Structure formats: C-alpha cells, structure tokens
Image (cartoon, helix red, strand yellow):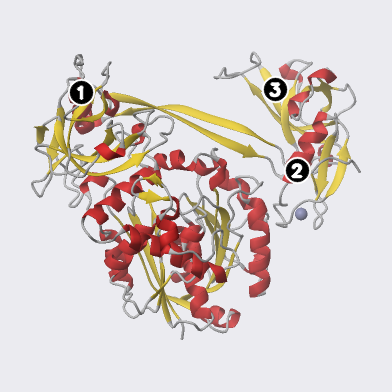
Amino acid sequence: MSEVAVVGFAQAPNVRRTPGTTNGVEMLVPVFHRLLADTSLSKQDIGFWCSGSSDYLAGRAFSFIAAVDAIGAFPPIMESHVEMDAAWALYEAWVKIRTGEVETALVYGFGKSSAGELRRVMAMQMDPYLTTPLWPDTVGLAGLQARLGLDAGLWSQRDMAAVAAASRRAALSNADAQLSGETTVEELLRQPYIADPLRAHDCAPITDGAAAIILAAGDKARELSERPAWITGFEHRIDTPLIGARDLTTSPSTIAAAKAAGIDGVQVAELYAPFTHQEILLRQALGLGEEVRVNPSGGVLAGNPLFAAGLIRIGAAAAEIRAGRADKAMAHATSGPLLQQNLVCVLEGR
Amino acid sequence: MVTISSEPLSAPLNVGFDYTRSLGPVLGRFATGLREHKIAGVRGSDGRILVPPTEYDPVTAEKLTEFVDVATEGVVQTWSWIPQPLAGQPLQHPFAWALIKLDGADTGLLHAVDAGSPDRMSTGMRVRVRWAAEPIGSIRDIECFEPLDNEPTEREPGAGDPVTMVTTPIHLTYQHAASPEESRYLRGLAEGKLLGQRCPACEKVYIPPRGSCPTDGVPTEDEIELPDHGVVTTFCVVNVPFLGQRIKPPYVAAYILLEGADIAFLHLVLGCEASEVRMGMRVRAAWRPRDQWGTTLENIDHFEPTGEPDAPYESYSQHL
Ligand SMILES: [Zn+2]
C-alpha cells in the first residue's frame, strides 16, 4: 500500500469573529491559494478533496455545499465531506491514497463558531433522548471532569493555570494564534470562575477559522517536499456517549488509538485539549514525559476553530517534522463531549 | 459602476424544530417510570447498574434487558457551578451541573442541583429528586435535584399508557452574515438594481454574485447591472400544498436567466395560466411598490410573460 505524507499546510488566522459567511468561502479561498502556491500544484493536480464542518455550527442544512465553490468544483471533482473535525476527513483522504485510488488529496476544515451560541450549539452532540433536552453546556460539562481530577489529586488548579500560561507563551511564535502573551500562574489564579472550578483561561476561546492540508503518496510526496511528514500510524477510537458511565479522569479511546498508532519515541505532541485539565489528562493517559514538547503551536487554548482545530494539530505536528525540529511527532484530535472520540496520527521525517 | 457600501449585511437567524423521537423498550420504560416518580436502571454485562439505562452495554455492546429500580436520592460525584444559566437549562437561576450516583446505581446521572450557592455544593453531598409539576415521561420530569436539608417539594406522579415517544424542541439562534458580494447584490435590490458580478478568470456573470466562482475558485469582482428581463430556462408546476406556502397551488416556480447573466435564479412566474409557461418564454420582473423595497429579491413579486416571441433553445441551452 502507498506511503502517505503531509506535504503542505495552511490556515486562516484564528480570530474571535469574522464578518464572513458560515460557508467558510472567504476564509478558505486565501488558504487554498497559499497552499497550492506553496506546493506548486494547481487544483487539477488534486485527486481527492475532503472536508470537515458542521451544519449545527452554521445554523443551516448542507452548509458544506457552498464551501465547495471555494475549491472551484466545476468541472466535477472527486469530493467528500465528514460532519466532524477535518482530522477525520484527513483520515478518509489517507485511506483513499493508501488504497491507490488517488495520488494526492486536499483536506480542509472550517467553522464560524461565533455565528451561534456555541455553548448551546454543542449540546446537539449529546445523546438526544436524555441529555440534550437538559441543554448541558460545554463549559459546565468540562467543569464536572475537571473537578473529578482535582478531587482525585491528578491535577491542581495551579497545574491547570500553568497549562494556560504555557500555551499563551508558546503561541507567541504562532502568527495565526488568537491568544498569546506572557502571564503568570498567580495572575491567572486571581481571575474569577466562569463555571467553578473553571476560569476563563481554562477554556479554549471561541474561534472562527479554517485550515487545509495536502497529502501525497510516495514518490509524489518526495517530489513535492524536501522533507515530507510521513504518516506512520493513524487510528481513531470511541468511548460510550454515557458520560456518567465513563471514567472521566482518563481517556480509554485516546490510549487505545495511541497504542495502535505507535507513539513511542515521539518528540512533539500536538494535543486537542480545549480545557487546561484535558491537556494534563491526555499527557497522563498517553504517558508523555517531560522530554516531549507538547503543543509548540500553543494548542487550541490559543485558538480553537471548531472542525478545523483537529486538522490544525496534524498540520502543526507535520510542520515540526518538515522544519526538521523533530523526527517523530504525534497529533491528536477529539470530538464529542469530554474527549469521547479520539484520533491519533503519528508523523515521521526521514 | 454603482457605489454601495461593501460592509457585509447580517441579521439574526432563529432556527427551531420539535424533534419527535420514538423511545424503544429501554428508554420507553425509563420515561414511563419517571412519570410515575420511579427511576429505572439496567444491569450491565459487568453487573454494574447503569442509570440512565442503556440499550447496549457501553463496554461489550451486549444487549441489556434486566431492569432494576434505584432510589430517588443519591450522592454528588462531581459538580460545576453555572452562574448564568443558558436558555433551556433545567433552572434559570444559578445552579450546579452534577453527576449524581443514585442509591443502588453504579453510574452517574447528569442533572442540575438547586443549591442556591456554590458554598452549599460539595463532592459527596446527598441530594434528592425534585419532580416536575406536570410529569409527561421525559428526563425533564426530574425538574432538578436538591440538597437533603431543603424542605421537600411535594409533587403528584402521573399515570397513563406506557410512554413510547418524546418531543424535544430544539431552538438555536445565530447571527447570519451574507458575503461581501451577496451584500452588494442585496443592497442593490433595495435600490431596484439587479447587480451581478463577473468572474475575472472565466468571465461568467453570476447573479447573485459569488464569493468564489465554482469553476475557478476565485471571488467574482467586476460589477454588472443586469436588466430585469430574461427567459425561463426550466420550470416546475407546484401542485402540492406545504407548510409555509404563500401562494395557492397550482403555480409555477421557474429558473429565470436574465439577459447578460450566465446563471439562472429561481423565482415565480405568474400572470398567465400555469399550463402556458414554457422553456424559452420571455419574462419581465413585476416589482412591488417602491415603498415596500428592502434588501431582498422579494422586491420582485414575480416574473410575468412579456408576450414577445420565445427565445431560441440554443440561446439558453448551455445554462440548463
Ligand atoms: Zn470563473
């Protein structure tokens, strides 16, 4: 089966609100333009297109159809869409190349999280019979998980603030980040709770954004990039949606996906942790030691464009490989309430 | 060239739908029990009592059938404090979300606790159900939980046939934005102008203009004012009544290709019998009175036949 590598990555700036449409066209057109220019490819060179986005975020049905305009979809192209983070669209594209059906693929994700009331919109991902009717909000739910870990001594509020401070510091070198800067744990701990035990800095910001990645097979990848980021492991797993029946202080599906993907020896990890305690939880679950650089991009605490943010983790991890700053990296993406579904992508340079 | 502000237009968009769902034997039994002030769990394949009950085991995916009633009192496993509740949540004053392990259960039920202040919340505290005033067989029959030292609120259970369906109203609010190109088009309509834009690559004229040409993937740019007449490229006769319909059937919905445009848009053709409408028929806009104009294509009430000879098929065949 074909080897597959990331050969290009571009993203729109992560911002609190764009004036643009929920179909993402305004954000995507410049991203595609830059990505194709960087790889010297034209749209005719792309064998398969796959996207991730959400109708609930857009507030209308089939919202991804309008986004297809941005890729110039006439004459007809081979195209697919997942109603999930585009990290899962990248999985579909990876399979398409592995099976030899195509040689190249462009994967994109976009979301205008600011269009609706995000904390309520996200209730639509819960069990629709017994949970959504209560309208549980994402921050309130995350607070339940954070407190379980606090009570169990797995992390402290100080540890959580330290994650936020480190994220903003790392994001100083990320031109597309929404939140960055120097701050201290003491300063963060003086802030009020927004959902005790969570403060604002414990939660990823509301972000509009978009991103795209180009994948290529074997020799094509070597032709397009001096140092492609080869995908050597790619797995996703899911836990029960019954949050009360899960051990919320860990993430069995992440552990299983990481084991199957083979993360031993990674030097960099880009983790999709929208809450500070979840970064600690994932580090503990994955057994990532101090030697592993976690979220050099700042992670989603520095900008969380829903449905693109998981894809951006893969793009950021691939960038570490392609720049020669790491030989082995992992990217993690999550979906569903409280780390229910998790995907792990392992990338290597050689 | 028309000079119009290019700041995108936006407006509130409220979407709502009452989802009606059939519950099946497991959730149906749970819902029926709630109406009678009983809480049913189900025994998992590892022996744990799962509350709320689940049709299949969360670990082994085995089908589960053994129901066990649990208590209406239990322990808070974890909680978070919501100082500003959102629309639709169980309480509209500050409350706590909690996972509550009811006595006899092994898993946590998500619900609200009405404790008044975060100082009265703690992990391990005991709480009891406060039932809703009018039980219907829904998770909302549990109004919330309350600390045991609260004065209990007495409520009557309900009765009736087993609950098989639940209706969950979903209402979401958005701020919908038009693209810069669409905004110029909509503002043009408010002045009685039909503005298209030309793709700089393929030179096709789109109305409404597009944020990106579907052939070339670039924003349309040059502005073109189009006339308010054109031809019917294709059409359908609507005979079926439906919710929200504004005109009595039968009537004609047609694709109208304005002269000079490369894409047709959907509008109504009135002013003749539905059976007289045909492909190639020349039509002209019937505008509403000027004082009713806004940033909408509804400024054109409908299109009507001009009476001129039909356009030859070749003149619009590539736009079908
Ligand atoms: Zn064009």
Q: Is residue B166 above or below residue B108?
A: above
Are marks 2 and 1 in one subunit?
Answer: yes
Q: Amino acid at mark 3?
A: Val
- At numbered mark 3, what does the secondary structure look like: helix, strand or loop? strand
Q: Is residue A317 above or below residue B113?
A: below
Q: Amino acid at mark 1?
A: Thr
* Of pointers 3 and 1, the one earlier in the residue sequence: 1
Residue named by callout 2: B7
User: Quadrant of the image for the N terminus of chain B?
Assistant: top right
Indicate the chain on which mark 3 is placed: B
**Could you classify mark 3 by the number of other residues whose Cα lies within 10 Å: few (under 14), some (14-19), or many (20 or more)?**
many
Indicate the chain on which mark 2 is placed: B
Q: Amino acid at mark 2?
A: Glu
- Residue A169, position in %: x, y? 50, 68
- At numbered mark 2, what does the secondary structure look like: helix, strand or loop? loop
Cα separation, mark 3 vs mark 1, equals: 49 Å
Residue B173 relative to residue B319: left or right? left
**Could you classify mark 1 by the number of other residues whose Cα lies within 10 Å: few (under 14), some (14-19), or many (20 or more)?**
many
Are marks 3 and 1 in one subunit?
Answer: yes
- Residue B144, position in %: x, y? 27, 29
Ligand 1 has an atom within 8 Å of the beta carbon of the residue at disc 1: no
Quarter of the rendering containing residue A9: bottom right
Residue named by callout 3: B252
